[in-house]
Image (cartoon, rainbow, N blue to C red):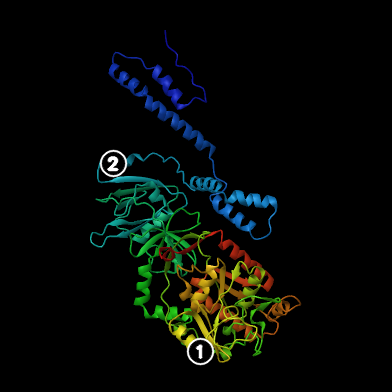
Amino acid sequence: MKEVMPVLTAGAGLHETLALLTSQLRPDANHKEDMVFLKDVFSERSLGYLMKIHEKLRQYERQSPTPVLHSASSLAENVAEELQTGPMSTEEKELLHLLMSPHLKAVLSVHDTVAQKNFDPVLPPLPDDFEDELDEESVKIVRLVKNKEPLGATIRRDEATGVVIVARIMRGGAADRSGLVHVGDELREVNGVSVIHKRPDEISQLLSQSQGSITLKIIPAIKEEDRLRESKVYMRALFDYTPLEDKATPCQEAGLPFKRGDILQVVTQDDPTWWQAKRVGDSNLRAGLIPSKQFQERLYAAHPSRRLAYRMKMGTLPNPKSPKKPASEGCDKEDCDCEGYFNGQYIAGLRRSFRLSRKDRQGSSGEDSEIGEPDFLTYEEVTRYQHRSSERPRLVVLIGSLGARINELKQRVIAENPHRYAVAVPHTTRPKKPHEKDGVEYHFVTKQQFDADALNNKFIEHGEYKENQYGTSIEAIRSVQAKNKMCIVDVQPEALKRLRTGEFKPYVIFVKPRIPESRRRRSAATSPGGGEHGRLTDEDLQEMRQSAVQIDQQYGHLVDRVLIKEDSASACAELRGILERLERDSFWVPLSWMRT
């Protein structure tokens, strides 16, 4: 009687098929040993488990699940920041509390990790003509799936042997994720095409044109590169970089473009010339090439033309034409009492800034009076910092271009909340007026004492106004912070280097006015209740633009926030929001500040 093979349903899984197949194996007189072997193999429990896993993976693949967002954490942070920009309803406060909770942040972080993972498809079988190659132990055939992304590897020709070798593996790229290609591997073929006699640029083009799967014939390096852990080094870029304009880069397509102020995670510094980095917050998992700090500095030192161009850009070359001195924005009355009053309320330390009447100014702030050649800007290592209630408040530093009227902006914010914000009481050599008290309006000192303090670098800046000396001291800032108040100072940009220390952890805000571009727009800005430039000429407006550009070029790398001042009310509201976030949010700060 002939046995009938059981019929499998369309929905039967591999493990069910395997079980039925095993049950149909019957010993045969001619092939008894082979049948017993097959039955033992198919009956193995571990093989059944593998078949079940394979079936689940195929089912998952057919569903093709894709995340709606790859960066839910960033979206949550943006929503939270948007909620904090204005008054909140009860529901909005509840939403903000939920978004800021550590449990939800952890869930979103896990979601992003999974969403950004690249689940490669199953590779097709190798062609038959590669079987002979597999017999050679020194040759490795690698099949990768790179979709539309670059391979994530650079090559070079060895000068001694002439062979093409893998020079660099980009962290997070297709080659790195596979774990099958390493630095030092010799490349023989790409998709069956020999590369032995091809130029590196021809090979790079061949690699970039390959879509979907790509097959490489490789002779492994004698000592394969150890897979290093991704570093946690973060750098703030202090210059703009465009790889397509850099002829020195080994591979322009592999370069990582960035702007000044971007935070970069440097994942490897193995190559002293070209680092690999990612932009923080970028959804791209593949690292890109950036010039190392040492390489940038060597280029600057080795090329006088680069130094000249850099100094011209930074505005530190001597200017044979003396710029027109801007008019004073302060009151010129000798006995004016407006120095410490705002909206009828006296606030200690608020006064007409001596810096604003430069036509009467004879001196400047000590050793910072002359701007020498700046250090060539590359990167600054940074870390996350969040203010703790047990620490002194961070120092807030305002710098402004012509027309910004930052003294008025500072006064408005402090007048709204004098118990929370304050300014450093300045020193002066002018005589005390009858209604004034020493240490309230000013610290009144003799000229001899003032000169001695200036000589001992006790002032962050100082100057002369109407034959009287004025200055703001380091101790005056410390005195405000000792009262657990946030100290707000407005200084000339030259003073930033003196203030950028771990003691003060300053947050620098660059205030510049919204300058109309044409006479027609300027007329709109001078309408009732509108602008602050009503009596300014076109020449004045041009000087204001030049002032903003020069400050940005010379000191923009030290700025944490740019505040465009449309009008006093909106600028005050924006500044108030910044000050509130300084006490609760985390910010990137130089790593050196945390080591002091």
- Position above or below: 34 against 54: above
- In the displayed structure image, the side of residue 532 where residue 546 appears, left or right: left
Q: Position of residue 302 (x, y in %)?
A: 34, 76
| Image quadrant in which the C terminus is located | bottom left
- 1 and 2 marks in contact (CB < 8 Å): no
Q: Earlier in the sequence, mark 1 or mark 2?
A: 2
Q: Which residue is mark 1?
A: 447
Q: Amino acid at mark 2?
A: Leu
| Closer to us: 213 or 564 | 564
Q: Amino acid at mark 1?
A: Lys
Q: Position of residue 410 (x, y in %)?
A: 62, 74
| Image quadrant in which the N terminus is located | top left
- Report, in whole angstroms, how far the alpha carbon at label 1 lies from the one at label 2: 89 Å
Neighbourhood count class around disc 1 (C-alpha, 10 Å): few under 14, some 14–19, many 20 upward = some
Q: Position of residue 4 (x, y in %)?
A: 45, 13
Can the viewer see residue 324 in this picture? Answer: no
Q: Which residue is mark 2?
A: 134
Number of the front mark, 1 or 2: 1
Q: Secondary structure at mark 1?
A: helix
Identify the residue shown where x is 50% and y is 62%: 391
Question: Residue 235 is drawn in which quadrant?
Answer: bottom left
- In the displayed structure image, the side of residue 370 where residue 408 appears, left or right: right
Identify the residue shown where x is 43% and y is 67%: 380
Q: Secondary structure at mark 2?
A: helix
